[in-house]
Amino acid sequence: MKKVVLITGGSSGIGKSVGEFLTDKGFVVYGTSRNPDKIKNHSFPLVALDVNNSATIEAAVAEVISKEGQLDVLINNAGMGITGPIEETPTQEMRKVFDTNLFGAIDVMKAVLPQMRKQQSGLIINVTSIAGYMGLPFRGIYSATKGALEIVTEAIRMEVKNFGVEVTNVAPGDFATNIASGRYHTPVFENSPYKKVYQENLDLMDAHVDSGGDPIEMAKAIYKVINTSKPKIHYKVGDFMQKFSIVLKKILPDKVYEKLLMNHYKL
């Protein structure tokens, strides 16, 4: 029987690339979008789902199970970015990103687990970020949401293992997607003490995304995880230096590592 896959945030970027790749490999794939009717020429079906609306989550999961009779893989990919000095970023905007990147992902996991427990099988892949392994200047809230999802994954993985359900993280580095256009930017205020360095870092972030890797690399990595009988807890997908930065954080003294980051971000 073909495995049934649900991908949140499947209308563009990494989610779309993963969905297309898995469809080509013979999986039954459903993506999600807040407004699927607006998405044209999509190679796999989209169902309406807003991770900040629990009713839409329940309805989308029920629709897939009703049509297919099973749900084998959840790829928790929906998310949003946020940039800005923490001092100048509205707390309300910070909460929105936590609601999407952390609590939204948790709510989708909660919605699929009864079916996976019933099947005594299932795989949940939480798409996090290499940025979640470190506090990055002007991206601290985004880093915090992804780091929190990594830790939640570690916990829920142990809670559901006896039901035959596997849970893992896949953390991408910089990939060429439209994430920059959809994230919340704290404005560069004219009278801000952070004005010059924040603008420089915004330009650097956008350059990293524009020159990032092909999202197909994430698709290949996720395909490999799906075909692994006992997935690891953490996977990282990115260029050598992005992955090596996590190793450096583990082995270097805290202040030495901080100095490396500050030099990189010209602080």
Image (tube, grey):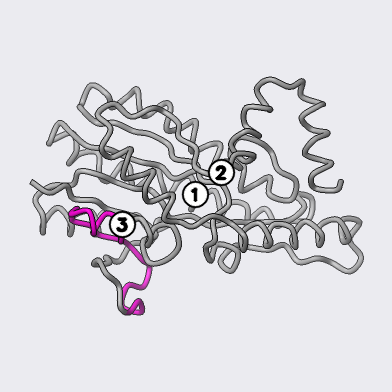
- Between 217 and 127, the residue placed more toward the observer is 217
Q: Earlier in the sequence, mark 2 or mark 1?
A: 1
Give SS at disc 1. Answer: helix
In the rendered image, the vertical position of residue 136 relative to residue 160, given as above or below: below
Q: Which mark is residue 145?
A: 2
Q: Which contiguous range is marked in magenta?
A: 19-40
- Between 198 and 214, the residue placed more toward the observer is 214
Q: Which mark is residue 101?
A: 1
Residues under numbered marks 2 and 1 in contact, where contact means CB atoms less than 8 Å apart: yes
In the rendered image, the vertical position of residue 211 relative to residue 223, given as above or below: below
Q: Residue at x 74, y 51 (%)?
A: 138
Q: Earlier in the sequence, mark 2 or mark 3?
A: 3
Q: Position of residue 91 (x, y in %)?
A: 67, 53
Give SS at disc 2. Answer: helix
Q: Position of residue 253 (x, y in %)?
A: 77, 20
Mark 1: give few (<14), some (14-19) or many (20+) Cα within 10 Å.
many
Q: Is residue 70 left or right of residue 44?
A: left
Q: Which residue is mark 3?
A: 21
Q: Is residue 186 left or right of residue 266?
A: left
